[in-house]
Image: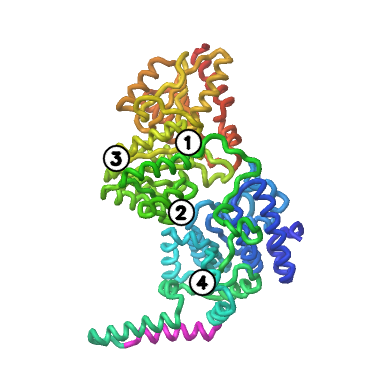
Amino acid sequence: MLETIQNPGQLKNLTLDQKQALAREIRDRIIQTTLKNGGHLSSNLGAVELTIALHSVLSAPEDKLLFDVGHQCYAHKLLTGRCERFDTLRRFQGLSGFTRPSESVYDTVASGHASDSISLALGFAKARDIKKENYNVAAVLGDGALTGGMCYEALNDAGQSKTRMLIVLNDNEMSISKNVGSMSRHLTHMRQSGAYRGFKQFLRKAINRLPKGGNRMERFFSRVKDSLKALLVSDMFFDSLDIEYLGPIDGHDISEMEKVFRTALTYDRPVVVHVVTRKGKGYAPAEENPSKYHGVSPAGEIASGVSCASVVGKWLIEKAETDERVAGVSAAMLSGTGLEEFSKRFPERCFDVGIAEEHAAAMAAGLALSGLRPFVALYSTFMQRAYDQIGMDVCLNRAPVTLLIDRSGLNGADGETHQGVFDTALLKSLPNLTVCAPSNTGELRAMLEAALERNAPFAIKYPKTLPEGEAGEGDVTRWKYVIKGGKVCVISYGRMVSVALKAAEMLKEKGLAVSVLNARTLNDTIGGENGRILREASEEYGLLAVLEDSAACGGLGESVSGAVGGALCLGVPDRFIPAGSIDEQLKYCALDAGSVCERVLQEARARGIDR
């Protein structure tokens, strides 16, 4: 049946039995493709019936459907004309693992980060009202998104403006499943009924008219008011925001969801519909361990190098055993950043703040200024959210916080929203902050040691894996030649040092000798020891080329050119980089060893350097 669905409007003509059969086909296709290509498995399996129900009620693309993060949009893609191309999911020049308007008119916005869907949806709804149009706007977000502060800013605004919109809370927390059943269904029908809504409005007005008098009477009526609300208006949180609440309902019961969604769309104010789903539904391994199968790697993929998260996690445990100041902070990424075992060993010194990177950075500043040494582990792409707090709360206060910037540089199949290519430009502009990038695991360990020793803000940025290696003697924050010779010097850092060395071998075969200089600290190009090394290099070499898998705009190349002039800047071009393998992305950006060889050779010859 799935191959016959070209647009979601066709769902309106299907029977419930056909929709349930379609859900099974969609689930099978998601499992087959994701296990082969990699991607978000558990979250998508849990949202299949929910997506079918929404599209059966809404009339997309006239109605606007937004998915928070977008990592649960695979069923949506299969129902909106992309079934034939679904095998290209997360492949180079294939379908994105998130929503992308460039792919389909049914994708309202480009997504990839959490907690912004209500704000975006509210913007669409307000624009609709200003333009006197009449379409529905629905945002789908997971319960994890509610750990992000933006959700509450948006809910507060939606409630006070009474803007008509639908907010679907996809709750896949297992402990809530006990609330799904006949009683909760009965309560949901009560909440939908006109009589209940009328009584609720009457109750709200009546409570507000209760008399106020002396202190004793005022306290009494305050307790009466609170008790009545607790007894009869169980959705006090949303009610206090002037937002209607329906639920919880079974997120795998298509018929029930359709009824509730249709009711919700009749309200003239924002409505939250709370659905409870099972993450990983339909695939036993994912149901038993939804966290493990939240994101899976492509079949047959073998990671090259050593996991940086593993190195960081082991080092932190080792240090915390002897140094009671060491603490770990994460924003809902304990496992991905290597802090999971640390959290088990030292639960009182490990803080998972949820999807709240801004809070993580600011709280870490408070920890540091109180005498602790917090290590804040964030993915590069999510670190961007905390830029203000890193600048104002950490750097301005000179708080000894260490930022562990994981997944720095190009990041593969997650595509545009997950590339860690902006961290160099963002971080190296901040005063009082030392920004380092290791080229191997030995340098990573040495930089962690340096961060702990210094009583100042420190940042270490690294990719998912690095080759095993040694840091060597001396200060690991100082620039260091890896190979030396000739009239051309390639300055690089992080994992791109390996690419520079490969390019140097190619250039040597073409008769051009090249030095490779490992720039292990990124914001010390004018003063200090690294500035001196750079000035000497500019005098010794006829060509300096700076190679980095960070944005060329604002990157180290620009700093080098600003300091000594005339450098060849080889960085990520001024565009968002699509999904693909890291090798494909390097080639796309002309940053693979072969492309670097040709670009350096061409520039050297243009400057009269032939050996």
Q: Is residue 356 magenta?
A: no
Residue 575 visible (yes or no): yes
Q: Residue 91: x, y in percent? A: 64, 43
Q: CA distance from mark 2 to mark 1?
A: 25 Å
Residue neighbourhood size for the residue with mark 2, other residues' Cα within 10 Å, grouped as few (<14), some (14–19), many (≥20):
some
- In the image, taking residue 370 as reference, residue 263 lies left or right, namely right
Residues at discs 4 and 2 in contact (Cβ within 8 Å):
no
Q: Foreground residue, 218 or 202? A: 218
- In the image, taking residue 203 as reference, residue 578 lies left or right, namely right
> What residue does disc 1 label?
550
Q: CA distance from mark 1 to mark 3?
A: 25 Å
Label 1 secondary element: strand
Q: Is residue 200 magenta?
A: yes
> What segment is highlighted magenta in the picture?
193-210
Q: CA distance from mark 3 to mark 4?
A: 47 Å
Q: Foreground residue, 440 or 140? A: 440
- Circle nearer the N terminus (4, 1): 4
- Circle nearer the N terminus (3, 4): 4
> What residue does disc 4 label?
271
> What residue does disc 2 label?
332
Label 4 secondary element: strand
Q: In this rendering, is residue 49 above or below 179? A: above
Identify the residue shown where x is 51% and y is 84%. Answer: 196
Q: Between tags 3 and 4, which lies in front?
A: 3
